Image: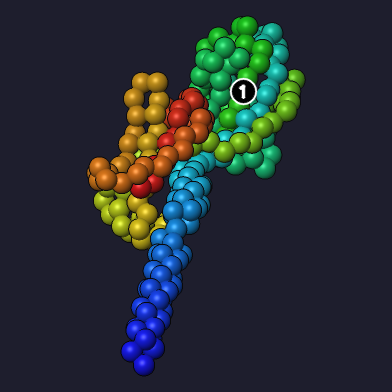
Amino acid sequence: MRSCGLFGKKGVSHVEIILAFVIFIAAVGFALYFFNPGDSDRLVGTSLTYAFREIKQNASVGVETFSVVIDDVAVVTGGSDTIAMNFPGVEGKTRVETYDGEVLNSSHVADIVNVNTDNWNGIDFLFVKFGEEFVETAGLSGTENATYYEIGSSNLKEVISEKRILNLKDAYDADYYSLRGEDNFNLPDRVNFGFSLVFDDGSIEAEREIPASLEVFSDTERVEVLRDGGEIVFADLMVKLW
């Protein structure tokens, strides 16, 4: 009987050990399920892609560019400083550049684009750009002469607007949580973000203080930017998540 009693105590001891091991494995599995680093990485990766897309969409504008051949001899012979060109159905303000990058005075009224310079000699090609943010010249008026020009190919692209990036930075600085929230970027509560646009001559940055204990994830893309002055340049758009 004593021997049986001893055997029973040993049996209970083994059961307790096995039960404790099972509970331990279950606890580890529970922790891995809810705090899986892989899931966290996927969340960050998805959020980074989403934040990048949202910033680009909120800061982009369309620019349509037409190539135009100019008969400069005919224009000079005609004796007018301003020529008028017909662009039916095209919308937006204009910026007109020569092949060498010289910016000419221009304005867009109805379907007519007026272009002005005091010397047409040697100007045989123009880039006529249309976009909502270009600054035009007031008071231009010309008479269309179809022999002066020939409109060629066109190209429509989306570019980052410096003006819109600055507006986005202002919104970030003024009310970060509203911008991050569901009515705007709709990022997860535990995800924070910042962004910067880096030019050769400076940068625009919107970023909160990042705790030293947190890992930072980032992505950078080379983008075309419409600057406030109307020129289009390249810059690096960087988005950070932590």
Secondary structure at numbered mark 1? strand
Q: Which residue is rendered at x = 41% and y = 60% of the image? A: 35
Closer to us: 29 or 116: 29
Which residue is nearer to you in this view: 3 or 32?
3
Q: Which residue is mark 1?
A: 127
Q: Is residue 139 above or below residue 30?
A: above
Q: Residue at x 57, y 35 (%)?
A: 63
Which residue occupies 37% across, 36% down? Answer: 196
Quadrant of residue 227 in the image? top left
On the question of residue 210 being in view, the answer is yes
Report how many numbered discs are placed on residues in the image.
1
125 relative position to 184: left or right: right
The three-letter amino acid code for the residue at tag 1 is: Phe
Report x, y in % for residue 61: 52, 41
Task: Locate residue 12: give its quadrant.
Answer: bottom left
Residue 147: x, y in percent? 75, 20
Q: Position of residue 135 (x, y in %)?
A: 45, 32
